[in-house]
Image (spheres, rainbow, N blue to C red):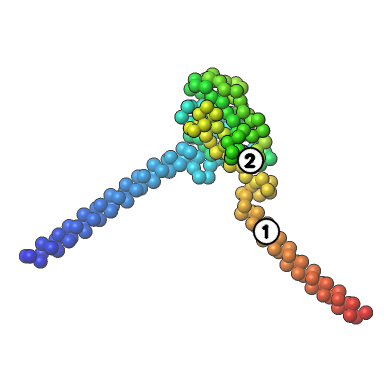
Amino acid sequence: MARDNPISRRTALKLTGATAAATMVAGCGGGSENGDENGDGNGGSDGYEIEPDTTVELDAQTTEWKGIAPSDIEGESNPTLILQAGETYEIGWTKGDGSGHNIEIWDDSDSVVNELSTEQTSEEEPSDQMLEFTASEEMVAYVCNPHSANMHGTLDVQGSNGGDSGNGNESESGNESESGNESESGNESESGNESESGNESEE
């Protein structure tokens, strides 16, 4: 009987540990779901691809920019917008909470790019808070100046080096490999030069 108690205790401890582990895993799962929701709310790591000539409409809330249009960003908090360099877009807010807001496009030094900034207004449905612009690599954020700590969305401008190769560095590295192939053809031309030297020897 003395041996049965330690075994049963060990069994009980194993079961307790398994239950605790399962609870922790379930807890982590719940946390990741919340994390995903939060990630989606911020546009996620990938963001939302915006077609050229699209108008991006936002709801100006003191705590955040909330997406209105296009439909992909509807209801999203400070959505990350993926744009193509050299293409034209329009962005601004058509609805607000009555506080004083504006919209500006910033570079990585928190400076306004190309004077893309509107005057501050507290109108709830303003008609003059839209910015039309051509996307460029230096543009990294759209912000409300008075509430830039909260109303701060990311601009991810892609394709600045390749136009159609909008998916960026990977395609650029692909071009490098192509240039490698060109160098191989260069080697062939060198062999051609050797044959020419052969012709010279025949002379």
How far from the left and from the top, in percent, is residue 144? 54, 29
In this rendering, position of residue 171 left or right of residue 6 = right
> Is residue 136 rendered to the left or right of residue 44?
right
**Quadrant where the image shows the C terminus:** bottom right
SS type, badge 1 = helix
Q: Disc 2 vs disc 1: Cβ atoms closer than 8 Å?
A: no
Give the residue furthest to the bottom: 202
Badge 1 crowding class, 10 Å Cα cut-off, few under 14, some 14 to 19, many 20 or more, is few
Q: Can residue 37 be seen in this view?
A: yes
Q: What element carries label 2?
A: loop
The residue closer to the viewer here, 96 or 140, is 140
Crowding at dot 2, Cα within 10 Å, few <14 / some 14-19 / many 20+, comes out as: some
The quadrant where residue 114 appears = top right
Foreground of the two, 138 or 3: 138
- Which residue has dot 1 on it? 176
Type of residue at label 1? Glu
- The residue at the point 55 percent across, 38 percent down is 154
- Reading the image, the residue beneath label 2 is 138
Mark 2 / mark 1, whichever is N-terminal? 2
Alpha carbon of mark 2 to alpha carbon of mark 1: how far? 24 Å
